[in-house]
Structures are given as structure tokens and as C-alpha cells.
Image (cartoon, rainbow, N blue to C red):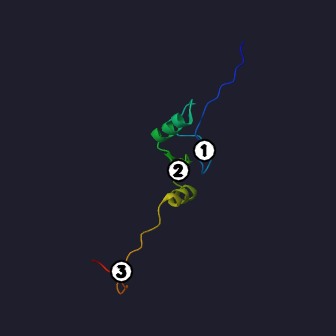
Amino acid sequence: MTIRAITFHIVSCDVCGDEDTGDCVIPLFDTPQAAADGARRCGWLVTVDQRVICPDTDHRHRTALDALMPPEPRTATDGQLPLDLGPTT
């Protein structure tokens, strides 16, 4: 019998640590990129910086997703003074 080391990659949620993808089985992958691609196919979010968020919809997951969003745009209101952008030519 031969004993050898095998390295593989799996995906786990950065919010809850879950590795269970429900009906979609994520097998063992050779590279981190292959694992990320497999997670995306199963509906998981993988950010540019390789954070992984499973599709659970509880408060913790919604908070993590909200943190990824840009700030709300500021809108002008009635009576607001215009910005002085300097002379226009």
C-alpha cells in the first residue's frame, strides 16, 4: 500500500462556516479558482477578494451582503442650495 499526500480545496462560507451546498454537491477541487467557480455554480457569492458567502438569508448573511454594497446616494431636497462649482465658460 502506498501512502501519499493529496492536497485539495473546498469552499466554506465566511459568514457561518457552512460547507453544505444543499442539493448542489461541491466536490474536492485541485485549485482555489476551481473551488470558487464550483461555488458560484451553486449560487454562492465569491467576491473579488475571495470572500465566500453562502445563499442563506438570515440576518448575519444579509448584513454581510449589505456591507459589500456602496453607500446610499445622496439626493437633493427642496430648498437645498446648489453647489458652487466655480465659473463656467
CA distance for labels 1 and 3: 54 Å
Specify the label residue 56 is tagged with: 2
Specify the label residue 86 is tagged with: 3
Given the current orientation, which residue lies at the most extreme front position? 89
| Residue 85 image position (x, y, % from top left) | 36, 78
Residue at x 56% of width, y 36% of height: 32
Kindly indicate the quadrant of the structure image that contains residue 72.
Answer: bottom left
Residue 25 visible: no
| Residue 37 image position (x, y, % from top left) | 48, 37
The quarter of the image holding the N terminus is: top right
Specify the label residue 18 is tagged with: 1
Q: Nearer the viewer, residue 71 or 21?
A: 71
Q: Residues within 10 Å of mark 2 (few under 14, many from 20)?
A: some
CA distance for labels 2 and 1: 10 Å
Between disc 1 and disc 3, the foreground one is: 3
> What amino acid is labelled 3 in the image?
Gly
CA distance for labels 2 and 3: 50 Å
Between disc 2 and disc 3, the foreground one is: 3
Given the current orientation, which residue lies at the most extreme top position? 1
